[in-house]
Amino acid sequence: MCIRDSSATDGVAHFFWKYHDPTHPLYNPEEAANYGDTILEVYRRCDRRIGELLERLEAEGGCNVLVVSDHGQGQLGPQAIHLNLWLEQQGLLGFRSNNGGGTLGVKLNTLASHAVQRGKRSLYGRIRFQTLTKLRRLWPDSLRTRLGAETFFPDVDWSHTRAYSEELRGNIWINLRGRDPQGIVEPGAEYEALRDRIIAELPDLVDSQTGAKPIRKVWRREELFNGPYLERFPDLIVEADYPDMFKPHGTYLGPQAVRQLTQAEMAQRAITGCHRMNGIFIAWGPDVAPGERLNDAALIDVAPTVLRLLGQPIPQEMDGHVLSQALRPEALAGLRTVSLAELGFDGAGGEVSFTDAEADYVSERLAGLG
């Protein structure tokens, strides 16, 4: 089994997409003449290296090779979704009025795309999210645990807020009584009814300029995730045509919860390409069934498939399943699952212990991810 990774294919798509894609709003033919082949050239070089690797492995007796991406790439277009503005328009999110009126029905045309940017702006509005995350790591636990949503959204009227979003990757939190410091939504029937309402209504959000409905689906968190830390996830996960529709776009003064960014707004962004939900999975080697096409493979299926190719047992508790269709029948012989207890775990959330070298490696990899 060969394991390698490449960040070049990711970075080049983020920064060179506008030169590659004639349909991108920032496409410039003169610039494209200089940089339009950059993405293709990175892939050509990767393809050559993969070819060299396969030739070498075949000469040495063969080895199973998987080419896997955890996402695809596409155009970072002009679409922008302002979840907090939509929630405010539905009467689910309230703000304190600058003029002292304090009424929930005050029309807020100065709602920012990321948290609230009117009057005194939130920390989210002033500091990049990644920088803020790094700063929070430096704060003592006693302070960090007290910095809840009300600190980062200083203009929110929590007594009149039933749901809100950080507007990062599409998430909605319910202001739940008993869990949140100023929660007003009762757990149980009221909580579920509110989630049902948002799930039913948000996908009908229409871009008035294009007529498109960019929200594909709103998921309950338990539909996508499970485990002991489920309660830390947002109550609702919003899936749009692509995740970057929810990212900050600066101060927005209009009334549309979904809109098209201007050329000037798009030019201010550092990247012009962004992730897509569907990636790739390619398998090659002596244990791989040639010519098969997988239509329902998921990222969580990669780990159990790799364990099978390595001849290792698969923990029953592991998410995903072996992509049996991709493997030869003889490679599936003797396939067995075991419990974590059989593998040496105590079955009650026992932790894996790392050597110092392993811990340093993990820390280095996580640092590379920001």
Image (cartoon, grey):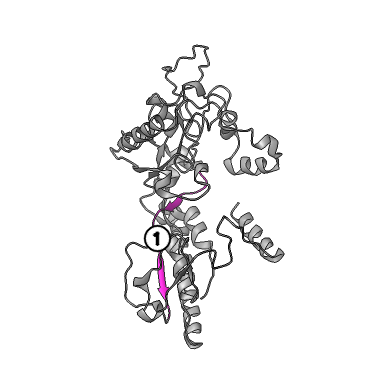
Answer left or right for 39 relative to 353: left
Residue at point 41% right, 49% down? 224
Q: Is residue 324 above or below residue 346?
A: below
Answer left or right for 191 relative to 124: left
Q: Secondary structure at mark 1?
A: loop
Q: Is residue 353 above or below residue 329?
A: above
Residue 30 image offset from top left, x and y in percent: 43, 53
Q: Is residue 368 above or below residue 119?
A: below
Q: Is residue 343 above or below residue 176?
A: below
271 part of magenta stretch:
yes
Residue 295 image offset from top left, x and y in percent: 32, 63
Residue 218 image offset from top left, x and y in percent: 37, 41
Give the quadrant of residue 357.
bottom right
- Residue flagged by tag 1: what amino acid is it? Ala
Report the residue marked by disc 1. 298
Answer left or right for 136 relative to 3: right
Q: Which residues are magenta?
A: 269-285
Residue at point 46% right, 63% down? 316
User: Tag 1: Cα neighbours inside 10 Å, few (<14), some, or many (≥20)?
Assistant: some
Q: Nearer the viewer, residue 335 or 255?
A: 335
Residue at point 59% right, 54% down? 369
Q: Nearer the viewer, residue 291 or 53?
A: 291
